[in-house]
């Protein structure tokens, strides 16, 4: 256990011996979650693009042919494609966040975690990486659901 002049209780102590391993573990979990999210984002983005292109092609044809019901269905498809695209944009933001945290973790590799401030910074980064991994997993699950709905097998 490590502490410092400002850590006066057991609750203020930390395990500086395991901090580097904690960073590595959190980085690995976050990386796996981010990769899963990226793969899901590609599937949903492809579905959105395909749906949008098909609706763009067919809606005018049915509109000109005097079939407003079919034309309206293709308009609904365009709206849904937009919803899919928004979900992929949100996923890209999470992937970007994980990428930045990955860089932060790499920069900490040379830190001396026996120093209180550096240990605190590392602990905060581990917490941020854990939160980002949880967000990435939840977003990937949501995208997978959208992928199944938008392009069933």
Image (cartoon, rainbow, N blue to C red):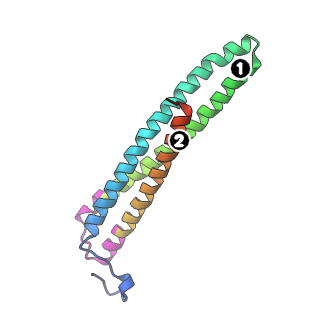
Q: Position of residue 135 (x, y in %)?
A: 47, 54
Label 1: element kind? helix
Q: Is residue 103 visible?
A: no
User: Residue 120's quadrant in the figure?
Assistant: bottom left
The reply to whether discs 1 and 2 touch (Cβ–Cβ < 8 Å) is no
Q: Position of residue 23 (x, y in %)?
A: 30, 63
* Quadrant (top left/top right/bottom left/bottom right) for the N terminus: bottom left
Label 2: element kind? helix
Q: Residues within 10 Å of mark 1 (few under 14, many from 20)?
A: some
Q: CA distance from mark 1 to mark 2?
A: 26 Å
The structure residue drawn at horizontal position 28% and vertical position 57%, both measured from the top left corner, is 106
- Vertical comparison of 29 with 150: above or below: below
The structure residue drawn at horizontal position 54% and vertical position 39%, both measured from the top left corner, is 146
Q: Earlier in the sequence, mark 1 or mark 2?
A: 1
**Residue 121 is a magenta residue:** yes
Q: Residues within 10 Å of mark 2 (few under 14, many from 20)?
A: few
Q: Give the farthest residue toward the front.
A: 153
Tell me: 94 left or right of 5: right
Q: Give the farthest residue toward the top.
A: 65
Number of the front mark, 1 or 2: 2
Q: What residue is pinned by disc 1?
A: 70
Toward the viewer: 106 or 82?
82
- Vertical comparison of 73 with 124: above or below: above
**Residue 21 is a magenta residue:** no
Q: What residue is pinned by disc 2?
A: 145
Q: Is residue 153 visible?
A: yes
- Vertical comparison of 94 with 17: above or below: above
The structure residue drawn at horizontal position 39% and vertical position 83%, both measured from the top left corner, is 11
- In the drawing, what numbered circle is on residue 131? none
The structure residue drawn at horizontal position 33% and vertical position 81%, both measured from the top left corner, is 13
Tell me: 34 left or right of 19: right
Residue range (magenta): 106-122
């Amino acid at each position: 256990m490590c502490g410092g002049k400002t850590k006066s209780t057991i609750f203020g102590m930390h395990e500086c011996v395991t901090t580097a391993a904690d960073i590595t573990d959190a980085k690995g979990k976050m990386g796996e979650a981010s990769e899963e999210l990226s793969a899901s984002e590609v599937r949903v983005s492809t579905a959105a693009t395909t749906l949008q292109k098909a609706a763009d092609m067919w809606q005018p044809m049915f509109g000109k042919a005097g079939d407003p019901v079919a034309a309206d269905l293709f308009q609904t498809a365009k709206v849904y494609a937009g919803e899919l695209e928004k979900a992929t944009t949100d996923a890209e933001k999470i992937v970007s966040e994980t990428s930045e945290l990955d860089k932060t973790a790499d920069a900490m590799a040379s830190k001396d975690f026996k120093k209180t401030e550096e240990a605190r910074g590392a602990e905060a980064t581990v917490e941020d990486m854990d939160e980002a991994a949880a967000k990435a997993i939840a977003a990937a699950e949501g995208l997978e659901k959208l992928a199944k709905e938008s392009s069933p097998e």
